Every structure is written in structure tokens, then in C-alpha cells.
Image (tube, rainbow, N blue to C red):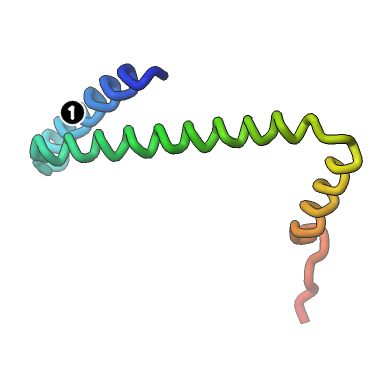
Amino acid sequence: MLPNELEMSSKLWYIWKARNELRFCKQKWSVLQVHYVVQAHINTSISSLNKKEQKTQIGASNSSFTGHRNVDNIVRIAALEPQSNQRELPG
């Protein structure tokens, strides 16, 4: 989504949410509360998109490595993961 589309859709969604909370839950939102929630939503969305872009850039740069480095990374990751097939017996 483009930033303008994200901002507009967030504003409309939170206005709708505030309306529904007033109608069904009897909770009133102030205009500033809606504004702050929209800004927080936009900021977190943009930061998560930036993190995803960084991960894809890192993944693209890792693909240029030679094969043995990728195998080394897989071995390191496998060593860090807990062994899910080994269960302790009660007793």
C-alpha cells in the first residue's frame, strides 16, 4: 500500500471502530484518541514494512554467497533449534 492509501484506510477504519464502540459498547472515543491511534498504526505499519524490506535485501545478498556458507548457516540454525522429536518420559 502507498503511504497515502495506508493513512486514509487507517483513518476510515478507526473512525468506523470508534463508531461501533460507541454504538455497541457505550465507549466514546475523542477525536484526539482516534488521531493518536491512527498515527501509531501508521508508524508500526511503516516500521514493519521497513523490516521486511531489510530482510529481503539481506536474503538477496546471502544468495550471492557460495554454497558452503549456506550449508554452514543451516547447520548453525539446526544446532540452535530445540529437538522436538526428543520427549522426556514421565517418571
Q: Nearer the viewer, residue 33 or 62?
A: 62
The quarter of the image holding the N terminus is top left
The quarter of the image holding the C terminus is bottom right
Which residue is found at the position 63% from the left and 31% from the top? 57
Assess disc 1: are there few (<14), some (14-19) or many (≥20) residues with their C-alpha within 10 Å of its C-alpha: some
- Residue 79 position, x and y percent, is 81, 58
Q: Nearer the viewer, residue 14 or 62?
A: 62
- Which residue reaches farthest right? 68
Three-letter residue code for mark 1: Ile
- Left or right of 52? Residue 18 is left
- Residue 52 position, x and y percent, is 55, 34
The residue wearing badge 1 is 15
For residue 3, above or below residue 31: above
- Count of numbered circles on the image: 1
Q: Nearer the viewer, residue 29 or 70?
A: 70
- Residue 25 position, x and y percent, is 15, 42
The picture quadrant where one finds residue 13 is: top left
